[in-house]
C-alpha cells in the first residue's frame, strides 16, 4: 500500500496565512477521493532564516494511486499552494 508524502518550505511569518489554505485544500481532496486520509504536519522548529517545513501525508485503504497523486498536484495548483512541492511515495517495509 503506497502512502504519499508531500513536503515544502514556507516562511514562518506566513504560517497563519497558509494553514487555512492547506486545510481547505485537503478537505476538498477528501471530498474528491472517497476514503482518502489526509494529514498536515510540520517540523518542530524553523530554520535560523525563519523557514518552516510542512508535510502533507495521504493514505488510502487501496493505496494512493498515480491518478490520485496527479489529482493532488492539479488541485494544489488550483488552490495556490506553494509551487515547490516535493512528492514521494513510501510503502511499508517488507
Image (cartoon, rainbow, N blue to C red):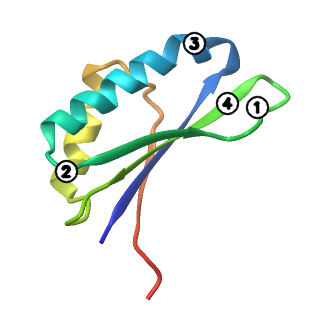
Precedes in sequence: disc 4 or disc 3? 3
Q: Nearer the viewer, mark 4 or mark 2?
A: 2
Secondary-structure class at tag 4: strand
- Position of the N terminus by quadrant: bottom left
Check the image and report above or below for 92 versus 31. Answer: below
**Position of residue 56 measured from the top left corner of the image (x, y, whole percent):** 45, 42
**Position of residue 40 measured from the top left corner of the image (x, y, whole percent):** 48, 38
User: Mark 4 and 2 residues: CB-CB less than 8 Å, in contact?
Assistant: no
Secondary-structure class at tag 3: helix
Residue tagged 3 = 16
Residue tagged 1 = 46
Residue drawn 43% across and 28% down?
83
Q: Is residue 76 visible?
A: no
Left or right, 13 with respect to 86, comes to right
* Tag shown at residue 52: 4
Precedes in sequence: disc 1 or disc 4? 1
Amino acid at each position: 500500500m503506497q502512502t504519499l508524502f508531500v513536503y515544502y518550505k514556507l516562511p514562518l511569518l506566513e504560517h497563519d496565512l497558509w494553514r487555512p489554505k492547506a486545510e481547505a485544500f485537503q478537505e476538498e481532496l477528501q471530498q474528491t477521493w472517497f476514503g482518502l486520509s489526509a494529514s498536515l504536519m510540520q517540523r518542530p522548529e524553523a530554520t535560523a532564516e525563519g523557514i518552516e517545513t510542512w508535510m502533507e501525508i495521504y493514505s488510502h485503504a487501496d493505496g494512493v494511486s498515480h491518478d490520485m497523486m496527479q489529482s493532488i498536484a492539479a488541485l494544489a495548483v488550483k488552490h495556490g499552494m506553494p509551487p515547490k512541492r516535493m512528492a514521494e511515495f513510501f510503502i511499508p517495509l517488507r
